[in-house]
Image (cartoon, grey):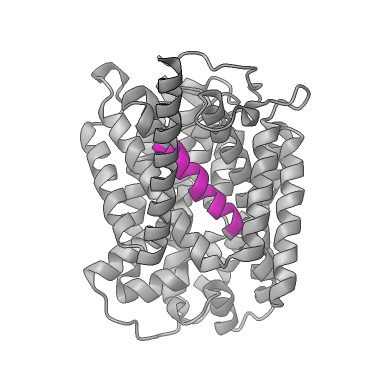
Amino acid sequence: MTAPPAGPGLARRLGLSDAVLIGLGSMVGAGVFAVWAPAAQAAGSGLLLGLVLAAIVAYCNAASSAQLAAVYPVSGGTYVYGRERLGEWWGFAAGWCFVIGKTASCAAMALTFGTYVTDINWLRRLIALAAVLALAAVNYRGVTRTARLTRILVTCTLVVLALVLVVLFTGTPQHHEMTSTSPYGVLQSAGLLFFAFAGYARIATMGEEVREPAKTIPRAITVALVIAIGIYLAVALALLRTGDPASTTAPLAAAVDGVGAVWAVPVVRIGAALASLGALLALIAGIGRTTLAMARNRDLPTWLAAVHPRYQVPHHAELALAAVVGILVLTTDLRGVIGFSSFGVLLYYAIANASAFTQPADQRRWPRAVNVIGLTGCVVLAVTLPWTSAVVAAAVLAAALLVRRFTTGRAGSARS
């Protein structure tokens, strides 16, 4: 077992339904409205196969995360699991992949929110920045408020999606010729679609704030993922029935417009905006907790390990995160941050699968084959992503490892 965390702990206030909704808030976010166009462009007629592959990898990753979380119910997720099962360097790599990947995801969610609110480029960036600051302030006030607002946003998003699905499945089918597919295209679409599945890690990173974490976290991860897979399958089938999702950047809005439900287009925009906010809120909470765990172990500046005495949140970590995400939304574009995020998160889950593989029989809930499939899937999907995103993300990770090697080497020399 891992040692108790240094410094003040976090209050355990979240039950099973809260944890499930935080996971859903991260998964059923902006991705359900935005990810279909690039995925369909990559996969063509193999879109459903790409979705199935992404779901399989996501399930394996979730199984590994749940198995590990039952044994290590503390904040930090795979950062903690990697340290305990594989060694400090693997834990650091996992934590760094998570922080940089999910920081990019925050920027992606904020930019998506701004895009659905307005078509004016400079204004959408300011709106995205305002969303980051507002939700960071909500999370700063405590995890209970975060869970409550997440519940409201997820409920609104699911209602909008249900309405859209009814419109699409009752509308007249539209027949479109899909482009041909290739194995590489299907794999790339799976990597892009995985971006929309990855939110269940938020549950594991909040291990110190969940009641009965050894029981609650595995259940919450499984329930949230199964619900998300069902939603994505329904949306994919509806889109393929009513139009060509590769032909537009807003496939759901275009689909409801194509079946004559013009009144539903603003509903889709509102739903996408709410989903983006829900995902952004859950991401801010999860990244703050992993940063807290890394700072406790001095893998990040110890200033980031501070926990607010009243609100019981890692407030320094969340202030730093809000500042970095604010800079990103003002200086980057949506495609770049999504590609960067996907690469980092896939490597994060690769380490989670490798960590779960090493667990002994008395800690196992799934066979080792699940860990092997998840690890292999993460690596394969990562290398199919656009090479620019992969190279930049790999360079950032390598730079962080070099800095850590240099600083730990100097610390060792000073002690000797």
**Residue shown at the point (57%, 39%) measured from the top left:** 286
Q: Can I make out residue 184 in this image?
A: yes
Q: Give the percent coordinates (x, y) of residue 348.
A: 40, 42
Of the 4 image quadrants, the one containing the N terminus is top left
Of the 4 image quadrants, the one containing the C terminus is top left
Q: Is residue 170 shown left or right of residue 262?
A: left
**Residue 327 or 195: which is nearer the viewer?**
327
Quadrant location of residue 124? bottom right
**Residue shown at the point (22%, 68%) measured from the top left:** 183
Q: Give the percent coordinates (x, y) of residue 158.
A: 60, 55
Q: Can I make out residue 218 in this image?
A: no
**Residue shown at the point (46%, 80%) measured from the top left:** 243
**Residue shown at the point (40%, 53%) measured from the top left:** 395
Q: Which residues are magenta?
A: 93-107
Does residue 174 lie above or below 184 as drawn?
below
Q: Give the percent coordinates (x, y) of residue 209.
A: 60, 26
Does residue 227 lie above or below 221 as drawn?
below
Q: Number of marks in the image?
A: 0
**Residue 32 lies in magenta, yes or no?**
no
**Residue 96 lies in magenta, yes or no?**
yes
Q: Give the percent coordinates (x, y) of residue 257.
A: 60, 81
**Residue 199 or 7: which is nearer the viewer?**
7
Does residue 64 lie above or below 381 as drawn?
above
Magenta residues, dominant SS class: helix
